[in-house]
Image (spheres, grey):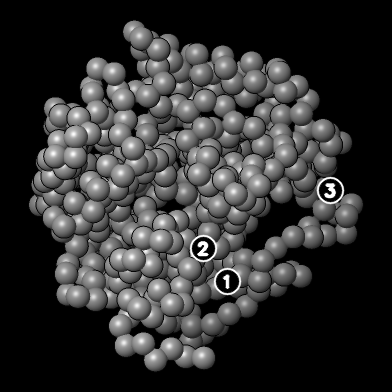
Amino acid sequence: MVTTLESPHARDIESLLHPMTNILTMEEEGPLIIEEGHGCYVRDSEGNEYLEGMAGLWSTSLGFDNERLIQAVINQMRKLPTYHTFLGRSNFAAIELAERLLAIAPVPMSKVWFANSGSEANDHMVKFVWYYNNALGRPEKKKIIAREGGYHGIAVSSGSLTGLPLMHKGFDLPIANVVHTGSHHHYRYAEAGESEEMFASRRAAELEELIVEEGPETVAAFVAEPIMGAGGAVMPPRTYFEKVQAVLRKYDVLMVADEVITGFHRTGNTFACETFGIEPDIMITAKALSSAYLPISAVLLNEKVYGPIREFSIENSMLATGFTYSGHPVPAAVAVETLKVYEEIDIGAHVRAVSGRAQERLQALATHPLVGEAQGVGLIGGVELVKDKESKENFDPEVANYCGDAALRHGVILRPCAGKRIAFCPPLIIEESEIDVLFDALEGALDDTLEHVRVSGLI
């Protein structure tokens, strides 16, 4: 039955179940309804305008009114609005997108598999890793190592890879064959006097110890975000991936790079794998692949992985997995146009040009009384909120949430993460003047939060 409620907020509360949302708070306060967007800004149903400092969900790289992407949707809808890629069917948009992704991959890749979200892509990555090892006659080599604090989605297997306990609680996750090793967050987990390089060496040694303890014959892959996203925009310490990859090669463990957030120029390079010297066997992309205008994600497989999968699928009569919307022509067409725009406007050069200002403003926040760490690269970064800089003691999550709400009152949308950090990740088209708007609001939000914790007796 259609509701007769007039308020859109009441209608939302009556009808929608929101992801990653406190249900009680939603019922009491209602949603923030975003009605329209332009450039780096969005406007809510009450007419308030906000600079979208998170590019939606780390994703709307070209802003909220790119006419070329809109026209790509219209053109493809008129020509072929839908079709599948099952049973040998294909479409020109999916073919061109796969070709373009292989051409710009940070290391040689062999094949592209399309899905609809980062969660789905990582979910299928697990299937491919398992299938690959079955193909090689190694049925015991199935464990995948992820990291505490990492985020790889919220499906059953991808949610298991995610290393945030809140996303496991009540869902019977993680599943078998998923294990976690320590976070790469130097500020939070380094021992006294431990340099970034020393910390990286320790984490690599711990990873090796875990592989040996689990049994190298059982460990199939290691998956990592180059920069931890939902964990709070956490940068890897120097030499971390170099040392980790040496361990993986020693024990024949696949390297999986989750570039869902960092892919497509976020760090100033096309992929963060280039920024941090990662050579993946499998790479996951989504979000900025289509500037989030339509859902699409991709799994890229190198020849080492694809070859055995190909032979095993022949033995099994087909590769018996897929989605109705794998390689859907309309999202694929939008993604093709997105990649063309990136190339034609040289978005990487723009990111490199303006990111100096972003990182300068970010580093300046390190002196704020509530900021324990301010860290980033390109157009992504975050600050960690602490009660005391010396002890690094965090507040309860309420304080980070308060800071996020305060930023909203200052006209900028930012992201409280992991209960202790505030992240930024604006559209890649942002200009320096808008970067100043973003950081002016974050400074104001931090000042408001400082007053709040003082009045509340939290410091």
Q: Is residue 257 visible?
A: no
Name the side, left or right, on which 343 lies relative to 157. Answer: left
Name the side, left or right, on which 189 lies relative to 9. Answer: right
Residue located beneath label 2 in the image: 296
The amino acid beneath tag 3 is Phe
Residue in the picture at 39% in, 76% down = 12
How many C-alpha atoms fall within 10 Å of the one at disc 2: few (<14), some, or many (≥20)?
many
Residue located beneath label 3 in the image: 312
Sequence-first disc among 2 and 3: 2
Name the side, left or right, on which 277 lies relative to 455. Answer: right
Above or below for 308 versus 59: above
Sequence-first disc among 2 and 1: 2
User: Where is residue 274 drawn, in percent x and y?
Assistant: 42, 35
Q: What distance separates the C-alpha of mark 2 from that of mark 1?
A: 8 Å
**Residue in the foreground of this view, choosing between 163 and 257:** 163
User: Where is residue 53 drawn, in percent x and y?
Assistant: 25, 53
